[in-house]
């Protein structure tokens, strides 16, 4: 039987990616005199890809990548005022209030009555802790894991460390690459909740034929899915 339901945080429980895209649009606007929009977006993505190992995921790494790209495309001639605006944009993202997605509060409250709940998220430790505290959901989770990357080994280590049998665990999230595929490879259930625009570095194919893969329309559908799975196990 399922005993543990794990949730991703960003764009599964609350809004996140749209703030990155809005800030990216501002970045392009500030630098449009040096390169076209598509080229700027491509150079920024390249910087983000390179910098993940240095800075990890999150707003701080994104801000540093914007500054690095601005310096590169302008051959170090970018005005100080532009750098200042990019830093301010990153700070604004870090201060943005949390907005829960529809049905999240009710779903987490319902599942917490019957299952062990874990939050497994990647990104900046301080920012993720801030988001969880502001969300009002913290007390409903039995554990929180903030990791630098979500891989099969990381999920396996979490399950072993908490004495959880992999096939008794389910991970719910909006990223096939981070929340679904590696959990299934670790022996658990992966539930895909599509939401909004997917960051290019999180794109991955869906394991559509795998017996432990499910896709739902929203987080509100998860309690019903869990009941169906438990009934048929």
Image (tube, rainbow, N blue to C red):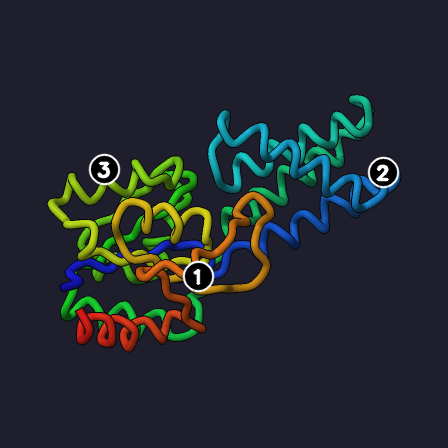
Relative to residue 139, is residue 178 drawn left or right? Answer: right
Relative to residue 196, is residue 42 drawn left or right? Answer: right
Q: Nearer the viewer, residue 109 or 177?
A: 177
Nearest to viewer (mark 2 / mark 1): 1
Relative to residue 204, is residue 211 drawn left or right? Answer: left
Residue 115 picture location, percent across and down: 16, 64
Q: Is disc 3 in contact with disc 1, using a CB cutoff of under 8 Å? A: no
User: As drawn, which residue projects farthest toward the top?
Assistant: 76
Q: Which residue is mark 2?
A: 35
Q: Looking at the image, tell me whether mark 2 or mark 1 is earlier in sequence order.
A: 2
Mark 3, secondary structure of its residue: helix
Nearest to viewer (mark 2 / mark 3): 3
Residue 41 picture location, percent across and down: 73, 43
The quadrant the N terminus occupies is bottom left
Nearest to viewer (mark 3 / mark 1): 1
Q: Which residue is pictured at 22% across the width and 75% down the height?
A: 227
Q: Which residue is mark 1?
A: 208
Q: Which residue is mark 3?
A: 157
For label 1, the crowd category at 10 Å Cα-Cα, with few meaning under 14, some 14 to 19 and many 20 or more, is few
- Residue 174 in view: yes
Q: Looking at the image, tell me whether mark 3 or mark 1 is earlier in sequence order.
A: 3
Q: Which residue is pictured at 18% across the width and 57% down the height?
A: 168
Image quadrant in which you'd find residue 193: bottom left
Label 2 to label 1: alpha-carbon separation: 40 Å
Residue 171 picture location, percent across and down: 31, 56
Relative to residue 31, is residue 94 drawn left or right? Answer: left
Q: Which residue is pictured at 44% across the width and 68% down the height?
A: 101
Q: Against 48, is 175 above or below?
A: below
């Amino acid at each position: 039987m399922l005993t543990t339901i794990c949730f991703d945080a960003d764009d599964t429980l609350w809004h996140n990616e749209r703030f990155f895209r809005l800030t990216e649009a501002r970045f392009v606007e500030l630098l449009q005199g040096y390169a076209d929009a598509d080229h700027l977006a491509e150079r920024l993505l390249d910087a983000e890809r390179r910098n993940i190992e240095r800075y990890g995921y999150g707003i701080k790494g994104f801000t540093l990548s914007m500054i690095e790209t601005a310096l590169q495309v302008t051959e170090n001639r970018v005005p100080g005022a532009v750098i200042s605006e990019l830093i301010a944009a990153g700070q604004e993202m870090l201060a943005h209030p949390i907005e829960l997605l529809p049905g999240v509060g009710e779903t987490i409250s319902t599942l917490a009555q019957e299952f062990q709940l874990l939050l497994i998220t990647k990104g900046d430790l301080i920012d993720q802790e801030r988001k969880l505290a502001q969300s009002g959901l913290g007390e409903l989770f039995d554990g929180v894991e903030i990791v630098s990357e979500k891989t099969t080994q990381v999920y396996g280590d979490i399950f072993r460390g908490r004495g959880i049998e992999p096939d008794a665990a389910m991970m719910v999230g909006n990223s096939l690459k981070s929340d679904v595929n590696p959990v299934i490879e670790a022996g658990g259930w992966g539930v895909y909740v599509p939401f909004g625009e997917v960051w290019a570095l999180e794109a991955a194919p869906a394991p559509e034929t795998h017996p432990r893969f499910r896709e739902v329309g929203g987080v509100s559908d998860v309690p019903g899915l869990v009941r169906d799975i438990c009934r048929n196990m």
